[in-house]
Amino acid sequence: MKLKTLALLMATAGLSALSVSVQAQTVIKIGYAVAATSHYGVGSTAFCDEVEKGTQGRYKCQQFPNSSLGGEREMIEAVQLGTLDVVNTSTGPVGNFVPEVKIVDIPFLFRDYDHARKVMDGPIGQDILTKFPAKGLVALSWVENGFRHMTNSKHPIVKPGDAAGLKMRTMENKVHMDGYRAFGILPTPMAFPEVFGALQQGTVDGQENPIPVILASKFAQVQKYLSLTGHVYSPALLITSPRLMNKLTDADKKVFYEAAKKATVAQRKKVNDDEATGIAQLEKDGMSVVTKVDGQAFRDALKPVYASYAKDFGAENIKKIQDVK
Ligand code: EAX
């Protein structure tokens, strides 16, 4: 009898040891273009911490910052193929995969951060997220890159005339490029990993990015002039694959979506913090900053392009976004 009990105990112990080893940890690979210390790193870490906590460690992340897995377009392709699990990416190349995203890339569409975040969190933004599965992708949440500003190595930009003729690196984004041409810029599309070198070598005169990216990527080392043009809001997305989502239990799925919400809050907060302290830092780093840009002149230059945006995206859809208060 005693022996039997012992055997039973041993069997139970063996079984639980087995069940522990069956619950192996799944490592999720998450990639982004900029440094681990950037807003992308902060958002991704918030996502990863919550996923690990919410699944009691059954899932954990391995992060690939600094474009170590390629540019944003390549990372989205990798998620589609299943070689990368999650990408935290600006919308730069996303419209080439999911055309419904393009409308939020229109320059001077959003008045400020409050407006942009309200649209993303509201029915318009949330409806765009539903368009991803048809393209073999799942958008977990809107995160954020920030309002984009121009930098260059030639001279201060106050009005479109100053930008005219400058060769400027842009994202691989037609909506942006069409708009920037109206400013007189010569847009040169390029993946992010090539930008620092192109600025250093003078292949391009300038580029445009939000303060958190300009800071994290040390563009002050290769660009003298920063103009706070805020000419376009740059949304970002946490994108994963249907393949990964379909493997999750309903409870784990909920954990992933909750984690994505935490990422949104954390990433936006880092954008706010960088906006608050970053301009002074960039000045310290040697940049000459134009804070008073002639925004109206930039908006006026864009008028003819808005007519073509209206044709592409529907004037009423643009107005719906503008009308969000
Ligand atoms: O997403 O390509 C870009 O300029 C992006 O803003 C940057 O990589 C962060």
Image: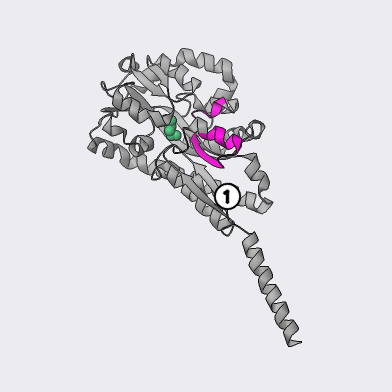
Who's the residue at 35% across and 36% down the image?
A: 217
Give the residues drawn in magenta, as a range: 75-96
Look at the image and tell me in which quarter the N terminus lies.
Answer: bottom right
Evaluate whether residue 277 shows in this view. Answer: yes
Q: Give the colour scheme of this rendering.
A: one colour
Could you tell me residue 81's position as x and y percent?
A: 60, 35
Q: Is residue 126 visible?
A: no
Point out residue 114 in the picture as x, y percentages from the top left corner: 46, 37
Closest to the observer, 118 or 309: 309
Looking at the picture, does residue 128 appear above or below residue 313? Answer: below
Judged from the image, the secondary structure of the residue bearing numbered disc 1 is helix
Instruction: In the displayed orientation, state which residue is furthest to the bottom.
Output: 2
Can you give x and y, in whole percent of width and height, for residue 256 in the image? 59, 49
* Residue 45 rendering spot, x and y as whole percentages: 47, 49
Q: Seen in the image, is 127 located left or right of residue 221?
A: right
Q: Amino acid at mark 1?
A: Glu
Q: Nearer the viewer, residue 81 or 56?
A: 81
